Image (cartoon, coloured by chain):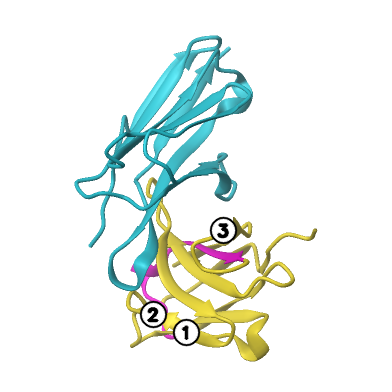
Chain colours: A yellow, B cyan
Amino acid sequence: EAGVVQSPRYKIIEKKQPVAFWCNPISGHNTLYWYRQNLGQGPELLIRYENEEAVDDSQLPKDRFSAERLKGVDSTLKIQPAELGDSAVYLCASSLYSNQPQHFGDGTRLSIL
Amino acid sequence: GQQVMQIPQYQHVQEGEDFTTYCNSSTTLSNIQWYKQRPGGHPVFLIQLVKSGEVKKQKRLTFQFGEAKKNSSLHITATQTTDVGTYFCAVYGGYGNKLVFGAGTILRVKS
């Protein structure tokens, strides 16, 4: 089966600019996750979707971050405006259902200048 | 919220030596997952442990869940250069019962 697909792989922007990431989960997976991973740390959950519904966005900085999962398939994560501290790898993952093993995409490495 | 302590933070071994990483929690866990992340790669699911005292093996990898379900270990026998990467344990907990990752153990193998 095709894995989780993310784009772009790399993104370099200046601070205060907007940026968006895209994720296509594994076909049939109901649950989709966005994580942020800083260097030398484990992934930290930003938001979790069950189909179209965001069921856990408690860790999402809502003043500048937004996400959507239209039609319960693809998802986008947006940052506007970006800050220097947002530099990290943004990982998308999906699972058949919650509490099932998660399959990760290759991530987007974001660098803020 | 739910936290797990993972030790050691880093280990450098000679090829052929064994390696073990430990994951500890102050609370009883419902289950625990282990992931491997190669340098520059993404986390890849290895295994999930559910039962108290459970032991599972995948070739040279042995995973164990403690009797009290508060700790777990991953042991690699006779490491190879392909074992290089960061090994994360992950547990469910906290608000929303989300998957919380440990800080990971970085394994380097000298050939």
Residue at the outermost left position: B26
Whether discs 2 and 1 lie on one chain: the answer is yes
Residue at 31%, 42% in the rendered image? B69
Mark sitting on residue A102: 3
- The residue carrying mark 2 is A57
Q: Nearer the viewer, mark 3 or mark 2?
A: 3
Viewer-side residue, B56 vs A40: B56
Count of marks, rendered view: 3
* x then y, percent, for residue A20: 56, 80
Q: Chain of mark 2?
A: A
Q: Is residue A1 above or below residue B45?
A: below
Q: Is residue A6 above or below residue B80?
A: below
Q: Residues within 10 Å of mark 2 (few under 14, many from 20)?
A: some
Q: In whole angstroms, how far apart are the C-alphas of marks 1 and 3?
A: 17 Å
Residue at the outermost right position: A1
- The residue carrying mark 1 is A54
Q: Secondary structure at mark 3?
A: loop
* Residue A67 in view (yes/no): no
Q: Residues within 10 Å of mark 3 (few under 14, many from 20)?
A: many
Q: Earlier in the sequence, mark 3 or mark 2?
A: 2
Residue range in magenta is: A79-95
Q: Chain of mark 3?
A: A
